[in-house]
Image (tube, rainbow, N blue to C red):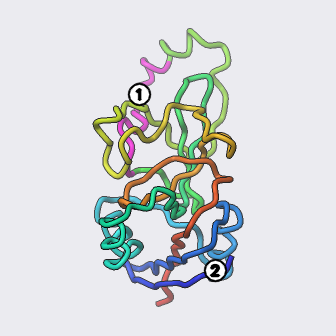
């Protein structure tokens, strides 16, 4: 699981991208821990563009244009959890930040009146959700990717990734687009994020 690394500075954070040899997200996250960092979360189009430019080098892009690598899977610190009750995916970040980028219909603030109407239909309305979870609707069509997502992504809630299991993790593909895949799928890299010391 050793690899080569690149450093880039973004605002008050340092990005550490590492090429690894086919490691699941849990093993790859250990690389971030060695650098006192966490797998990277993304919060704006600017951050995402910077990340893609830092992770996918010009030489990798030229190789990609000649012969695409369909198995590229550079891990991010984003995870999707299927909410069976609402048939949606909830998102959380490894660094406990809010999933605020890349999702349509982020949590809407309801009025108390609307909440009361909604709660009358369900007697179990006191269920607590993790603090850093952001529900989002999967309204993406294969021909219309949403923001950073590859066409057809994110998948329908609870989708399977073949022999690897459910799609709960997010990675960058060879085109610099996000895809949801199993956390057990072997990845080719991970991007870590660390706050810079003053």
x%, y% of residue 152?
40, 38
Mark 2 touching mark 1, by CB under 8 A? Answer: no
x%, y% of residue 25?
64, 61
Residue 27 in view: yes
Q: Is residue 96 above or below residue 108?
A: below
**Label 2 or label 1, whichever comes before in sequence order:** 2
- Residue 177 among magenta residues: no
The magenta span reads 101-115
Residue at x-position 42% and y-position 53%: 178
Residue at x-position 65% and y-position 68%: 29
Spatial CA span between label 2 and label 1: 38 Å
Q: Is residue 99 above or below residue 62?
A: above
- Residue 103 among magenta residues: yes
Residue 146 found in image quarter: top left
Q: Judging from the image, what secondary structure is the residue with disc 1 in?
A: loop
Q: Which residue is mark 2?
A: 36
x%, y% of residue 126?
66, 26
- Bin the neighbour count of mark 2 within 10 Å (Cα to Cα): few under 14, some 14-19, many 20 and up: few
Residue 114 found in image quarter: top left
User: Which residue is outermost to the top?
Assistant: 121
- Bin the neighbour count of mark 1 within 10 Å (Cα to Cα): few under 14, some 14-19, many 20 and up: few
Looking at the image, residue 76 sits to the left or right of residue 152; the answer is right
Q: Which residue is mark 1?
A: 110
* Front-lying residue, 157 or 196: 157
Residue 133 found in image quarter: top right
Of helix, strand and loop, which mostly describes the magenta segment? loop
User: Which residue is outermost to the bottom?
Assistant: 198
Identify the image quadrant of the N terminus: bottom right
User: Which residue is outermost to the front?
Assistant: 67
x%, y% of residue 154?
45, 40
């Amino acid at each position: 699981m050793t690899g080569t690394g690149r450093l880039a500075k973004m605002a008050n954070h340092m990005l550490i991208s590492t090429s690894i040899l086919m490691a699941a997200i849990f093993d790859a996250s250990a690389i971030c821990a060695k650098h006192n960092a966490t797998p990277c979360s993304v919060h704006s189009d600017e951050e995402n563009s910077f990340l893609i430019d830092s992770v996918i080098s010009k030489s990798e892009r030229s190789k990609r244009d000649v012969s695409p690598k369909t198995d590229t899977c550079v891990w991010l610190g984003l995870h999707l959890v299927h909410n069976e009750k609402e048939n949606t995916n909830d998102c959380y970040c490894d660094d406990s930040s809010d999933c605020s980028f890349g999702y349509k219909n982020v949590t809407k603030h309801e009025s108390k009146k609307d909440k009361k109407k909604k709660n009358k239909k369900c007697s179990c309305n006191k269920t607590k959700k993790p603090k850093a979870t952001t529900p989002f609707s999967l309204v993406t069509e294969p021909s219309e990717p949403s923001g950073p997502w590859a066409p057809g992504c994110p998948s329908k809630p609870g989708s399977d990734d073949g022999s690897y299991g459910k799609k709960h993790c997010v990675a960058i593909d060879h085109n610099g687009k996000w895809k949801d895949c199993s956390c057990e799928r072997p990845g080719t890299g991970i991007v870590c994020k660390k706050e810079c010391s003053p």
